[in-house]
Amino acid sequence: MIEVRFHGRAGQGAVTAARLLAEAAFLEGKCGQAFPFFGAERRGAPVVAFARIDNKPIRIRTQVYEPNHVVVLDPTLLEVINVAAGLRRGGTLVLNAKKTPEGISGIKVAVIDATGVAIETLGVPITNTAILGALAKATKLVSLNSIIKAVRNYFGDKLAEKNVAAVKAAYERTQLMKLS
């Protein structure tokens, strides 16, 4: 089973990103599960969402404490939360940032300016679909095409193409590195 933890702030789409990842896995014939964990429910508050993917039915319903991959939609969370806590050996940190922040070492990191991509393609700083393009490139957990199909299924006609453009742009621009 592959487990992914998403860190974001309310209103950035972390919950939707987890849901779209689970749907993309389903479109590939896998089993997927996605669910959020909310603290204070207000715009801008830290939010955590989780996704699990497996080739067999997923029966576990707990939070993800030792994820295979961690996705960070808001780089300011690095200052207040240890987002890499519990990240399994060989896992990847997918980070919305203009550059790799100081103090991260010993892990694989995928960096994408998802905020810039979102503003460019959507006109708003909602980073969820852009970050999924980066996740697809960094982990190969699901294919880019499956992410695109899930996005088209979820969003209406008008929003789907803008979000697909965000996914594709982020996929192309994501920088992969191993920090030692």
Image: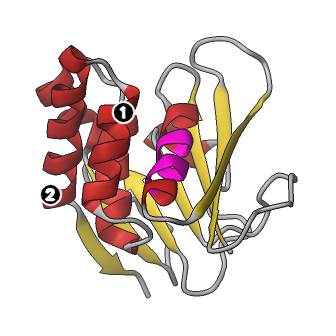
Residue 114 in the figure: left or right of residue 69: left
Residue 49 in the figure: left or right of residue 17: right
For badge 1, the amino acid type reads Asn
Q: Could you tell me which residue is drawn at 29 percent across and 67 percent down?
A: 137
Q: Which residue is mark 2?
A: 173
Expressed as whole percent of the image width and height from the top left, the position of residue 16 reads 51, 33
Q: Quadrant of residue 34?
A: top right
Q: Could you tell me which residue is drawn at 36 percent across and 33 percent down?
A: 153
For badge 2, the amino acid type reads Arg
Q: Quadrant of residue 138?
A: bottom left
Q: Which mark is residue 153?
A: 1
Q: Toward the viewer: 180 or 7? A: 7
Say above or below: 28 vs 83.
below
Magenta-colored span = 18-24
Expressed as whole percent of the image width and height from the top left, the position of residue 157 reads 22, 19
Q: Could you tell me which residue is drawn at 41 percent across and 55 percent down?
A: 95
